[in-house]
Image (spheres, grey):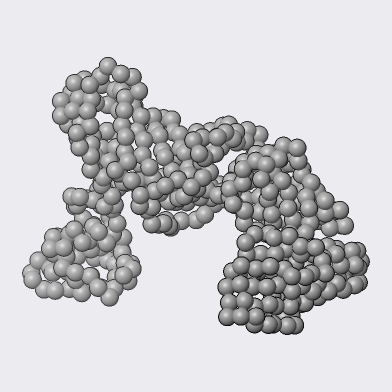
Amino acid sequence: MKRTFVVALFVVALANLAFADDVAITVYNQNLALVKEGRTLDFQKGVNKMNLTDVASSIDPTSVHFKLKSGGDNIQLLEQNYQYDLVSSDKILEKYLGNDIDVIMKNGDVLHGRYLSSSSGYLVLQLPEGAIRLINGLEMLSVTAPKLPEGLIVVPTLQWLLSSEVSGKRDVEVSYLTSNINWHAEYIALLDATDTKLQLSGWVSLDNQSGKTYRDAKLKLVAGDINRVKPPQPMYAKGAVMLDRVATAEGFEEKAFFEYHMYTLGRPSTIANNETKQVSLFDPATTPIKKLYRYTAADGSKDVNVVVSFKNSEANGMGMPLPAGKIRLTKLDTDGSEEFLGEDQIDHTPKDEEVEIKVGNAFDVVGETNTIDSKRISDHVSELTIEVKLRNHKKEDVTVSALYNVWGDWQVLESNFTYVKKNARQIEFTVPVAKDGESVLRFRVRLNG
């Protein structure tokens, strides 16, 4: 239920407020990050409590690790409580059920009494003389409570029970895992006029909904599929999403890390809460490409896919392991404007592997498939005769890769075009089609199973 009143209250500041003076964050592409913060904390000798604020609201409290930056001092963390019951008008009123509050009306009147309940836009107040007053929320200006109810906090807080043999300030490192922060790669591929080369630019999009801003952080990204025992369920914080494009002066340095790849940004970066930040992944690279026409032969199928492929190798101007992400293909028009052609999703791609981009369907190249004969040789053996018509309405010749899916054990008995066994379940035929012409592929296949 939405409340139309404002709660005025007095908040007691938490002791031992500590703010990070240096931050490093490693973000995984599985909605997870490892946060490491250097802090200066003021310790008291003996067993005492300390409140650590300014942590991510999506923190995994079981992952918190605390260590002194310099050895020699005996300080032990005995107990930790994660407090996340944050202040809100609903929670304050809930804590004040059965207690006295002041209600300030828009006309200037102040009503004092015991708060009994609120529902349907009305607050129920028992006045000192015993009368019950139902107050319309639209007529109230604010509600005043004498103090912050016990158990409510202003910000997410780690409460530590420490045993220390020393007093005074010490530098420590606090690390923890947090969810609701993620990254993915996005690529822009600019095709040249001859459709033989493309210029590839890579961007990292970093989405922070973890409930904390990481200021001037040392940023690392890890690409790969790490194993999680129980992945946290995504939660999305409210707030405006900001787009922050960052200059490419000091971009990412890539290296192998265990069985993953790590990308380290060469300068500090502020990652604000409720913000999507984009950072250049690498400088634009130019690579030769192949433009392919691919048709999946099936009854009723007409679309011929256009595919652009390139090898991610140093010899081709590339060679950097490419994180999984969306790749958009564009091309310059004759007037110099950059136009969108299509997009696809690529998986994590190591160096020297092939990258394929399904751009869309060819407008001027059409396929048609018909089963023109079917014979049952035995209970488990049959023969099919397939006819594939490929029509090219373009002003230049094209070559179409016609794919036909099979099952069980199979054998091509005859074909009027060359073919290869692409895999155990697919045959690939290579069919040249002249400009403004038609080619007819006819083959017979025996199926066992």
Taking the spot 38% from the left edge, 52% from the top edge, the residue there is: 231
Q: Is residue 306 visible?
A: no
Count every numbered label the image shows and give the total.
0
The quarter of the image holding the N terminus is bottom left
Between 100 and 162, which is closer to the camera in this rendering? 162
Above/below status of 217 relative to 447:
above
Taking the spot 68% from the left edge, 77% from the top edge, the residue there is: 383
Above/below status of 438 relative to 316:
below
Say left or right for 298 vs 418. left
Between 311 and 137, which is closer to the camera in this rendering? 311
Where residue 7 appears, as percent x and y from the top left, is: 28, 58
Say left or right for 18 vs 439. left
Q: Is residue 149 visible?
A: yes
Between 374 and 355, which is closer to the camera in this rendering? 374
Query: Residue 363, located in which quarter of the rendered image?
Result: bottom right
Point out the residue furthest to the front here. 378
Taking the spot 73% from the left edge, 63% from the top edge, the residue there is: 428
The quarter of the image holding the C terminus is bottom right
Above/below status of 280 relative to 126:
above
Say left or right for 412 vs 192. left
Query: Residue 369, located in which quarter of the rendered image?
Result: bottom right
Where residue 433 appears, as percent x and y from the top left, is: 86, 67
Where residue 144 appears, as percent x and y from the top left, is: 23, 57
Query: Residue 55, located in which quarter of the rendered image?
Result: top left
Point out the residue furthest to the top here. 72
Taking the spot 83% from the left edge, 74% from the top edge, the residue there is: 440
